[in-house]
Image: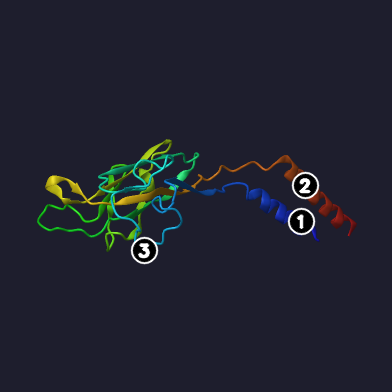
Amino acid sequence: MTLKRLWRPALAAALLSAGQASAASLTFTLGDEDCFGLGGPCAEGSDFASVAPADRSGPGDPVGTDVFGPNGTLNFGFLVDLGGETATSATVSARTVGLDLVDLGGFGDAFIGARFLFNGVDIGTFSTGSPLEIATASFAVDPGALMDMAINLLTIIPEEAFEQFQVFEDFAVDFARLSIETQAGPTAAVPLPGAIWLMLGGLGALGALRRKAA
């Protein structure tokens, strides 16, 4: 191997230590993903094998999960720690059943299905085609809306079939999840270690000796 082939990779490796950034994926899940307390997997688009009201929540289930009935507004809090990195994208989701297209026109429904909020900001509405359809609602979240080292709140507001009487439709949540992609800031240029300079200097000296001998 020639001296040129030796010192070029060494110098390239040293320079690559400056300016690089690392990425990471963070996932925060509330709930045990046990098909609304029934156990086993839940197929998207399938029908829920239960009749409301039903409470299949266990000691480890956060409030608002595995309960099928007129739950009203549910809140799920995610304690986020970005580890000193910057969020580049974020998605919030919830596996649900019962958020169907109930629209009894003339009774004051403000929306159909359920409205989702993240840290108090409306991020969209979600509904399914049938009363017992299992489906996961998913919304992109502005990474700038994330609060680091704090509780980030997902709020699910079901429609009221008879708004003036506050009759909420029956629904259930299996789990709620917040997924975040992060990127570390660009690192400062790192001074080359003394050993690198010694190695490069040695290679240069060897080159000089080879030229002199020639």
Label 3 – label 1 distance at C-alpha: 61 Å
Label 2 – label 1 distance at C-alpha: 10 Å
Q: Which residue is mark 1?
A: 6
Q: Amino acid at mark 2?
A: Met
Q: Amino acid at mark 1?
A: Leu
Which colouring convention does the figure follow? rainbow
Nearest the viewer among 146 and 3 is 146
Q: Amino acid at mark 3?
A: Ser
- Describe residue 70's horizontal placement relative to residue 188 as left or right: left
Q: Which residue is mark 3?
A: 46
The answer to whether 6 is drawn above or below residue 119 in the figure is below
Task: Name the secondary structure under disc 1.
Answer: helix
Disc number placed over residue 177 in the picture, else none: none
Q: Which residue is mark 2?
A: 199
Picture coordinates of residue 200, whole percent (x, y): 76, 48
- Describe residue 128's horizontal placement relative to residue 213 as left or right: left
Nearest the viewer among 65 and 56 is 56
Q: Are marks 2 and 3 in contact (CB under 8 Å)?
A: no
- Describe residue 200's horizontal placement relative to residue 89 as left or right: right
x 42%, y 46%: residue = 31
Task: Name the secondary structure under disc 3.
Answer: loop
Residue pushed farthest right?
Answer: 213
Please tell me in which quadrant of the rendered image residue 135 appears.
Answer: bottom left
Residue pushed farthest left?
Answer: 106
Looking at the rendering, in which quadrant would you find the C terminus?
Answer: bottom right
Picture coordinates of residue 26, whole percent (x, y): 48, 47
